[in-house]
Amino acid sequence: ADVRSAPVSRFSPQFNKAALAASLTARGIAYEFFGKELGGRPDRPGMYTQGRADYEKMAASPDFRAGLAELTEAAERHRLAVMCSEADPLDCHQCLLVGRALATAGLEVGHILPCGEIITHAQAEERLLALEGFAEPDLLLPRAERLAEAYRARNPKAAYQR
């Protein structure tokens, strides 16, 4: 499942939409494009805050919810890999937007690191809490709220800017 808004790469043309789809199909692997619904560069101006893609607005949009429902249905029928193009999951909307929504829906989400290691979404969230300064327990701010704040803090650092 390709969630790139613009499924092209000038550095790795084998990952351009048509080439990737053909290569996967030749190996018996289905390719589905979800970039319109789940991509990190939305078309609608209302999905941006101060020129940056706003993941909270995007997650609440009908298009995102419909794409997520379709992706979730596919995950129930098949082993699914959701692909984007960033090396670090915390720099990618696939983790911060799509992965978060899938994990919240109860699906098992793993992130493949450049070294080949797979970390769980929960491990990515622990790293997110630490990176954004919300790792320490707080009597006034429960973990769920600290995590929401950490996602908000990371959004402008990772999101597409117009």
Image: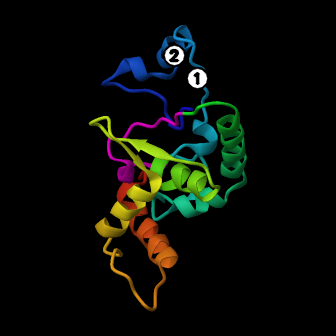
Quadrant housing residue 45? bottom right
Q: Which numbered disc covers residue 31?
A: 1
Residue 23 falls inside the magenta stretch: no
Residue 86 falls inside the magenta stretch: yes
- Indicate the secondary structure of the residue bearing disc 1: loop
What residue sits right under mark 2 in the picture? Answer: 24
Location of the N terminus (image quadrant)? top right
Give the percent coordinates (x, y) of residue 80.
57, 33
Q: Residue at x 37, y 53 (%)?
A: 90
Q: Which sits in the foreground, 150 or 112? A: 112
| Residue 116, above or below 122 | above
Q: Is residue 45 visible?
A: no
Outermost residue to the bottom: 140
Q: Residue at x 33, y 61 (%)?
A: 127
Q: Which residues are magenta?
A: 81-93
Outermost residue to the left: 115
Of the image marks 2 and 1, the number of the one nearer the N terminus: 2
Whether the residues at callouts 2 and 1 have beta carbons within 8 Å, the answer is yes
